Amino acid sequence: MNPLRESELLMTRRQLFGKTAYGIGTAALGSMLGKDLDIGGGAATSGSLPKEVADMIPHFAPKAKRVIYLFMSGGPSQMDLWDYKPKLPDKFDEDLPEEIRKGQRITTMTSGQKRFPVAPSKFKFTKHDNNQDGTWVSELLPYTSGVVGDLCVIRSMYTEAINHDPAITFIQTGSQLPGRPSAGAWTSYGLGSMNEDLPSYVVLHSSWTGRKSAQALYSRLWGTGFLPSHYQGVAMRSVGDPVLHLTDPDGLDRETRRRMLDGISELNQMQAEEFGDPEINARIQQYEMAYRMQTSVPGLMDLSEEPESTFELYGPDAKKPGTFAANCLLARRLAQRDVRFTQIFHRGWDQHNVLPTDLPKQAKDIDQACAALIKDLKRTGLLEDTLVIWGGEFGRTVYCQGALTRENYGRDHHPRCFSMWMAGGGVNAGTVYGQTDDYSYNIVDADGNPLNPSPTEFTPGAVHIHDLNATMLKLMGIDHTKLNFRYQGRDFRLTDVHGHVVEDLIS
C-alpha cells in the first residue's frame, strides 16, 4: 500500500508539469547539499485507497463487518474476575516465590517494598457451562457469566509495557511511542465506511464509580497519526452537542450553511487542483460529513424510540447519558447503522489499593451492560458479523501493594499475563484460551511449564497484543501484513513487524 501511488492517481496533467518544474531545482539543490539531506519529510496521501489496493481488500472472506471495542482503562485484575486460582487462599500473606517472579521488573510503586505478600482474591468464582468444559467467572460478573457461551475468554494475554500511558498507547496503536494510527483508524483506512451519514470510527467515553481519580485518555489514542485525518475517531459527548460545533450557530439556517459549505468546497477544490495535497480532499470530506451528521447524529442519540424492554435489558443506567450502559446501547444503535468501528472507554480500573471496595463498583458499571450488548446484538442478528472485544492494557499482580489484610488489598501493574474476551464476528465462542500458573503471574502450557513467550515469534497458548490485533484484522478480512502505509521511507502497519493470527480464537 503506497501513498505515493495514491497521490499519482489523483494528479492531473497540469499538476504533473507544475511539480516537474520545481522538482528539477529541488533535485539540484539536494545534490549540492549532500545525499543525506531529507527534503520534504513523509509522503502525502490521498483520502481514498488506490484502485489496485481497493480491489485486493478484503484479502479473504470477512467474518466480521464491524468492531465494538470495550476498553477498560487502568488494567482490570484478572485473578479477581476471570483467572480463577483455587490454591491461592492457602498461600495468604506468603512471600511470592522467587522462582515465580524470576527477577522480573516491577514498577517503582512497589519496587521499594521489603516483601511481596500473596493476596488471594476475596471474591468467589463459579464454573458456568459453555460449549467446552465450562468457564470460571467471578461473582462480580453475574450478568456476564450468563453469556459465557458466546465468549472466547483469553487468559494468556501479555505485553511489554508496564506503565499506563505506554501500555494503552501500545495496545491501541501497536507502538509504545505516540504518533502511530489507532486500530480503529487502520480499520477504517483499510475497509472504508459503510455509512455515508456517520463516521466510520466513533468513540464514546463513560463515567465510572470506582476509583475517583483515573488515568487521562488522549485523543491520539483514537487518532490517525500519519494516516489521512478523516479516518480518525469522532468522540461523541454525553452532555451538550454530541459533537462539538455540530449545531448551526444562531441566525444561520440550513440553506445558508449549505451555500457556505459549497463555497468553501469550491475554494478547497481549487487548492487541491493546484497543489495536489490529499489532505485538502480529506478536509472537503470532513466538512461534508459534518453537514450530514447534523441530521444523522440527533437521530442516533434519541433513545425515545427504544422500547422499555431494552432499558430493562441494559439496566437503569442506560437512561443516564454518559454511563457505560447508555454507551453500550448506543454501540448497538451504531452497529445497526453500520458504523465500522465503535470504541467505548471506561476508566477507573487502576486498583493499587482498596481493591475490594473499588473493583465491585467498576464491575457493576459494566457487567449488565456487557451481557445486554451481547444479547441485544444476538437478538437483532448483528452478533454474527460484529466483533466485540473486552479488556484493558495489562493485568494486576498477585502480590499486594501496601498493607495486606484478609479484607483489604491492592495490586500493582502486571504485563506478564492478563485476561480479555471476544464475542461474535467469527470467534470461537464458548472457549477458554491459554493458562497461567497458580499465581496468575506467568503464562504456562497445558502441563504447567512456563512458556516465556516473545513478540518476535508466535507461541501457541500465549497471545501478544500484536497477535490480538492481527487476529482482529483477520476476522475483518484483512491480512495484517498487507495493510501497510509508507511514511518517512518506511512501511508501517498496526502490528509493526510482528504479530501472528491466533487461529484457535477463530471458529
Image (cartoon, rainbow, N blue to C red):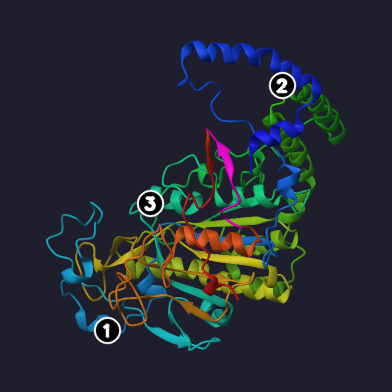
Q: Quadrant of residue 18?
A: top right
- Residue at 63% x, 52% y is 187
Specify whether residue 161 is in view: yes
Taking the image as shown, residue 434 lies to the left or right of residue 375, namely left
- On whether residue 408 falls in the magenta region, the answer is no
Q: Look at the numbered discs 2 and 3 and tell me whether their residues touch, using CB distance below 8 Å.
A: no
- On whether residue 487 falls in the magenta region, the answer is yes
**N-terminal-most mark, 3 or 1:** 1
> Label 1 to label 2, Cα distance in Å?
68 Å
Q: Quadrant of residue 286?
A: top right
| Amino acid on which disc 2 is placed | Phe
Q: Secondary structure at mark 2?
A: helix
| Amino acid on which disc 1 is placed | Lys
Residue ID for mark 3 = 164
Q: Secondary structure at mark 1?
A: loop
In this picture, which residue range is highlighted in magenta?
479-488
Residue ID for mark 2 = 275
Q: Nearer the viewer, mark 1 or mark 2?
A: 2
Taking the image as shown, residue 413 lies to the left or right of residue 147, namely left
Residue farthest along the right direction in this orientation? 255
Q: Main secondary structure of the magenta part?
A: loop
> Label 2 to label 3, Cα distance in Å?
41 Å
**N-terminal-most mark, 2 or 3:** 3
- Residue at 48% x, 89% y is 133
Residue ID for mark 1 = 87
Q: How packed is label 2: few (under 14 Cα within 10 Å), some, or many (20 or more)?
A: some
